[in-house]
Amino acid sequence: MLVSGRLVGLDQHVEIEVIEGVFSTITKVKDNGFDSQGVFIAPPLIDVQVNGFAGYDLNSDDVKVEDVCQMVKSLWKTGTGFCCPTIVTGSHQRMSRSIQAVTAALKDDAIGSSIIGIHVEGPYISPQDGPRGAHSKEHVRRPDWDEFQRWQDIAEGQIKILTLAPETEGAIALIEKLTASGVVVAIGHTSAKYQQIQDAIRSGATMSTHLGNGAHAQICRHPNYIWDQLAADELHASFIVDGHHLPPSVVKSMFRAKGLERTILVSDAVHLAGLQPGRYQFGGRDIELTADQSVRLYGTDYLAGSAIELVRGVENSVKFAGISLDQAFQLATVRPAGVLGLDNRIGSIQVDRNADYITFQWDELESKINVLSTVIGGQNRN
């Protein structure tokens, strides 16, 4: 099979030969009047924080294996080829059921090839209003290694990221155990002081979860836990670039401060993504999808996840931060792959790797991406 188009990152028209699900050759060819209606080729997007999509909620009380499978299939249509299903704060039993559903979905070869690990966000986070975000206060609790091990047993070792607040009692000891077991530890939903963040980094934390969000409505200008994480070169940072979580000027400033080499895009999508505005449930709490596609705790201004596809974050990064399309794609492919230690397998298009790619059209004037196909292992998943 031959695939032809402009390869993102190379800025060159190419022909790619795929044999038995593997990239066999990548050949530069003459560019004959390529325009905005032409086809672009890029690695599939990698979303390391997705709570649900298209009506499928991974954190509902009655989540089923089929919900996970349908969510992944819906994401394929948007250009997201790989994801970390994200389980948020809840009772031990509810979180266990969600983890069990994702683990069962991994048994399906097609679905399993797209799930690159489970992200557990909470329950070891700040109980304070603001930093806690939309997480249920009732179920916020102290770090518990035994509880995590029970979840990891259910997950058959597939929990790859855990987001916690390092100021909680026992967090530093837990970080050390998690990193020793190969789990990526992210700082998030925190009100930590500078030294607590530094202690977390020294203990192995390598990431900040949706930096700039999960925070008090009003904080000290300086110092504060956002600046402290932004300044830490040891931490990659994920950002929700949906136009609601962070204003465009903040996105641009944070990208510049953190550096694109340490910046990751996430959707933080909840199951409302793709649905009509209205009142819904998420993680046992009432939330509202507004007409402008923001997701908020019902009756408040607190955000409760997003309603975008990751590809919209790529578009917005170009518009808000003034970076190139190539650079924006790296934030949703190479960077997350690197944080998870998977950059030797996914995140870029190279000879002898699995034929994972997307094709799309790019409207440069409108900064709009129209996904045409998502291919995993040489198989079209659209």
Image (tube, helix red, strand yellow):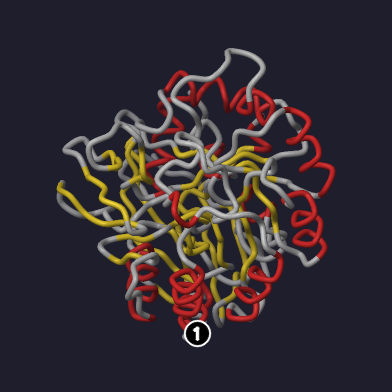
Closer to the camera, 132 or 20? 132
Closer to the camera, 348 or 151? 151
Closer to the camera, 143 or 322? 143
Task: Residue lying at the far top in this picture: please name it.
Answer: 221
Q: Tell me if residue 264 comes above or below residue 248 in the rendering.
A: below
Q: Tell me if residue 309 comes above or below residue 249 in the rendering.
A: below
Quadrant of residue 247 in the image? top left
Q: Tell me if residue 269 comes above or below residue 262 in the rendering.
A: below
Q: Residue at x 39, y 73 (%)?
A: 68
Residue type at mark 1?
Answer: Asp
Residue 70: x and y in percent read 33, 73
Q: Quadrant of the C terminus?
A: bottom left
Residue 207: x and y in percent read 67, 45
Q: Residue at x 48, y 62 (%)?
A: 87
Is residue 212 toward the left or the right of residue 36 in the image? right
Q: How many marks?
A: 1
Closer to the camera, 351 or 233? 233
Indicate the secondary structure of the residue bearing disc 1: helix
Q: Badge 1: few (under 14), some or many (20 or more) residues near its Cα, within 10 Å?
A: few
Label 1 belongs to which residue?
A: 109
Q: Residue at x 47, y 66 (%)?
A: 91
Q: Residue at x 35, y 35 (%)?
A: 302
Residue 147: x and y in percent read 64, 70
Is residue 142 toward the left or the right of residue 272 in the image? right
Quadrant of residue 238 in the image? top right
Quadrant of residue 118 in the image? bottom right
Q: Tell me if residue 115 comes above or below residue 280 in the rendering.
A: below
Residue 325: x and y in percent read 48, 37
Is residue 163 toward the left or the right of residue 167 in the image? left
